[in-house]
Amino acid sequence: MPSSAEGPRSLVRPGSIAWALVGLLMLLPALAVYPSPTAEPVLNWQPALWLTEPWRAWSAVWVHLSRQHLLVNLAGGLLVVALGVAARVPMRAAIAWATAWPLTQLGLLLMPDLVRYAGLSGVLHAGVAIVAVVLLRRADAASRRLGGAIVAVLTVKLLSESPWRGPLAHPEGWDIAVAPLAHSTGAIAGALLAWLLLRRR
């Protein structure tokens, strides 16, 4: 009886619900914003405007520059939401992801040549990094191994993108330029916030 009673509770955890809500708040507005021809210049990230129009640190994730850009980010967003729910992340992980959202864009101030940015990929990298930290801090070896594997893959990906080479890259098969630095700022912000918020008292 105790095991059956614990089963349903383990499937619906406040942290997992909060994680999914943060993800949906990133994903759903993007569907409404994409068809609007006037949304991009008002909502995208522009470093020159971050003090006078600070909302852009949040709204930039809803802007997508092509259908391919939108679809790939929506699919990636659903995968990151599913990853966090499957990992049964705690509430603090969801708070870390929500906080990493604007910090990802603020990190782009390190590269002033990137005069505008739009898209969700940087914040998705933050979510992956947060889940990895959650797993690394667990007591069981299987979780730590999985967390370590995620960190290794994420690190190789970020280094292979060479964000220090310039503000934009043109990957084969993409119909838009991408900003590799956003992936790095997202992953770093997510990892640091998760480590700070999840540390044992």
Image (cartoon, rainbow, N blue to C red):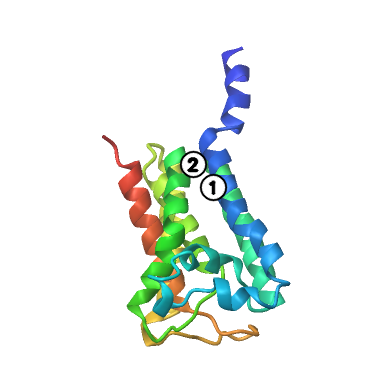
**Circle 1: is it few (<14), some (14-19), or many (20+) Cα within 10 Å?**
many
Task: Quadrant for residue 115, please give it.
Answer: bottom left
Provide residue 26's location: percent of width, then percent of height.
58, 57
Provide residue 137's location: percent of width, then percent of height.
36, 43
**Residue at position x 30%, y 42% in the image:** 199
**Residue at position x 54%, y 65% in the image:** 59
Amino acid type shown at disc 1 = Gly
The residue most toward the front is 52
In the displayed structure, 25 sits above or below 47; it is above
* Element assignment for label 1: helix
* Element assignment for label 2: loop
Query: Spatial distance from mark 1 to mark 2, Cα to Cα?
Result: 6 Å
Do the residues bearing badges 1 and 2 touch, measured as CB atoms within 8 Å? yes
Q: Nearer the viewer, residue 157 or 66?
A: 66
Q: Is residue 35 left or right of residue 191?
A: right
Provide residue 45's location: percent of width, then percent of height.
49, 74
Label 2 sits on residue: 89
The residue most toward the top is 1
Provide residue 120's location: percent of width, then percent of height.
56, 66
Res. 84 mark: 1
Q: Earlier in the sequence, mark 1 or mark 2?
A: 1
Res. 51 mark: none
Q: Is residue 179 left or right of residue 80?
A: left
The answer to whether any part of residue 113 appears in the image is yes
